[in-house]
Image: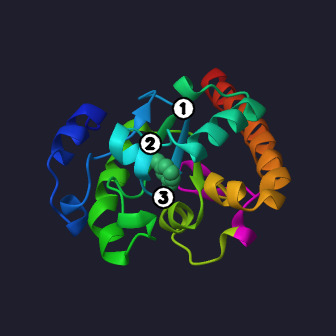
Amino acid sequence: MPESLAEIEAALAGCRLCPLAQTRTNIVFGVGNPHAEVLFVGEAPGKQEDLGAEPFIGAAGKYLNSLLALAGLKREEIYIANVLKCRPPGNRDPLPAEIEACTPYLRRQVRAIAPMVIVTLGRFATHFILKTEVGITQLRGRVHITGPFSVLPIFHPAAAIYDRSKEPLMEADFKLLGRLITQRRAEMAARQDS
Ligand code: URA
């Protein structure tokens, strides 16, 4: 039996593995359906998330919620976690040492949830999950297979809020996500029948 999300969250409590422990208000573990078919991985908590202890509750989260409908998803059926569980001061980029210290928790979350699809939001999540340095612009909009997971890299919602020309691509990618989920469900059903 893989460990439960509750066990992983208990292991994370009071974490002091990196200096972000000194500046955070709250650890932001992740939220959602523990048996989600789709796991969304973001970058790191922002100001609202640091205060509210929940991922994607600020402006980027509101935009993300509006996009989920295009994939036929409701927020309560997915799981959302971040590469970093604590906010980098001023929302600066995560540092390599912070990613190294924090991502064992994310790896454990992936194992516990065992999703069929992982949606990586932005370059830090995409680089960590796909183990590549290729730019997000080249990777987005296509399904990548890694182990048992279908991975769909998408621009970070905050990047699309900042640069509105990305909105049509975001919408296209969430529609692709809807088709991917339908296809993966059909594959799973066929496997169970055989
Ligand atoms: N941006 C992220 O990457 N994660 C959050 O939780 C909020 C904003």
Q: Residue at x 31, y 69 (%)?
A: 98
Is residue 53 toward the left or the right of residue 80 in the image?
Answer: left
**Circle nearer the N terminus (3, 2):** 3
Give the x, y percent position of residue 155.
67, 59
Q: Is mark 2 within 8 Å of ligand 1?
A: yes
Give the x, y percent position of residue 176.
79, 44
Amino acid type at image mark 1: Ile
Q: Gap between marks 1 and 3, in whole Å?
A: 17 Å
Q: Which residue is mark 1?
A: 78
Q: Which residue is mark 2?
A: 55
- Residue 62 numbered mark, or none: none
Q: Which residue is more in the foreground, 72 or 2? A: 72
Give the x, y percent position of residue 126.
56, 63
**Circle nearer the N terminus (1, 3):** 3
* Residue 78 occupies quadrant: top right
Q: Is mark 3 within 8 Å of ligand 1?
A: yes
| Res 174 visible | yes
Q: Which quadrant does the C terminus fall into? A: top right
Q: Please give the range of residues in magenta.
A: 137-152
Is residue 96 toward the left or the right of residue 33 in the image?
Answer: left
**Circle nearer the N terminus (2, 1):** 2
* Residue 150 belongs to magenta span: yes
Q: Gap between marks 3 and 2, in whole Å?
A: 10 Å
Considering the numbered disc 1 on the image, is that residue within a helix, a strand or a loop?
loop
Q: Nearer the viewer, mark 1 or mark 3?
A: 3
Amino acid type at image mark 3: Glu
Q: Gap between marks 2 and 1, in whole Å?
A: 12 Å
Q: Which residue is mark 3?
A: 43
